[in-house]
Image (cartoon, grey):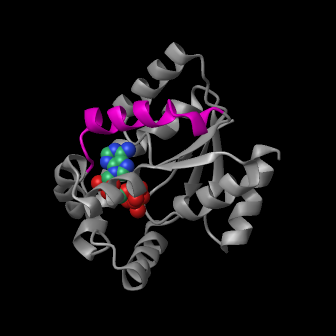
């Protein structure tokens, strides 16, 4: 099974991705986690990505596409995987389609979590206190929401027109949202 989780920052993608991963027995590939790990370790990727991330901007498409091509080819992805945070732009989505066409894979569903911007900002600010992520500050949050609207929102139509989109209300408790996703996916 190949799933994509799409949604604005603060919509709960990471939390729901972990629940889905356990339930479906597939690996979670979080590009945000991969990048934060690289920054922590000070690898060439981390050094390249850090400034973009701190500002709330996207890391360049070619960098991200390279990471994903490498990652989904690994052995633990054979049974399926869940992409959390990728694709985030139309070129990333097109690159993913091209990769899957080449390797005989297909996306089963794209789950998009919706939430009002007010609620997103509230969640991100409280996460800032709890986790201390360097991009959870008001300025970077504003940029990330704007980047979502401009670059990532168009993917909703992209996948809807391909019949892959499953829209789920992201408001409510973690369990409520998980249950909605389960129902929407029919399992
Ligand atoms: P959030 O959804 O809360 O913004 P993520 O952990 O998904 O958090 O991403 C954090 C940051 O990592 C993004 O703001 C961006 O700088 C970078 N990033 C993650 N995934 C991608 C991607 N697919 N393309 C470009 N940049 C990305």
In the image, what residue occupies the spot 77% across and 61% down?
179
Q: Which residues are magenta?
A: 58-78
Q: Is residue 13 left or right of residue 151?
A: right
Residue 132 vs 156, above or below: the answer is: below
From this viewpoint, is residue 48 visible?
yes
Q: Position of residue 118 (x, y in %)?
A: 44, 73
In the image, what residue occupies the spot 60% across and 41% down?
81
Residue 70 vs 128, above or below: the answer is: above
Q: Residue 89 appears in which quarter of the rendering?
A: top left
Q: Position of residue 120 (x, y in %)?
A: 45, 70
Front-most of 98 and 158? Answer: 98
In the image, what residue occupies the spot 45% across and 57% down?
8
Front-most of 130 and 160? Answer: 130
Q: Is residue 8 left or right of residue 15?
A: left
Magenta span: helix, strand or loop, mainly? helix
Q: Is residue 32 magenta?
A: no
Q: Position of residue 50 (x, y in %)?
A: 21, 58
The number of callouts visible is 0
Q: Position of residue 47 (x, y in %)?
A: 17, 53
In the image, what residue occupies the spot 36% across and 38% down?
67
């Amino acid at each position: 099974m190949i799933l994509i989780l799409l949604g604005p920052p603060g919509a709960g993608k990471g939390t729901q991705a972990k629940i889905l991963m356990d339930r479906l027995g597939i690996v979670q590939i979080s590009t945000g986690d991969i990048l934060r790990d690289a920054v922590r370790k000070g690898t060439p990727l981390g050094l390249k990505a850090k400034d973009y991330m701190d500002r709330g901007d996207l890391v360049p498409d070619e960098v991200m596409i390279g990471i994903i091509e490498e990652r989904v080819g690994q052995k633990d992805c054979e049974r399926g995987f869940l992409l959390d945070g990728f694709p985030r732009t139309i070129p990333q989505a097109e690159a993913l389609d091209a990769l899957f066409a080449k390797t005989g894979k297909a996306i089963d569903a794209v789950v998009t979590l919706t939430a009002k911007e007010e609620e997103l900002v509230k969640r991100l600010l409280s996460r800032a206190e709890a986790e201390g992520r360097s991009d959870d500050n008001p300025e970077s949050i504003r940029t990330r929401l704007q980047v979502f609207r401009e670059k990532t929102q168009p993917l909703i139509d992209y996948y809807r027109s391909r019949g892959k989109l499953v829209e789920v209300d992201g408001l409510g408790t973690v369990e409520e949202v998980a249950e909605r996703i389960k129902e929407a996916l029919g399992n």
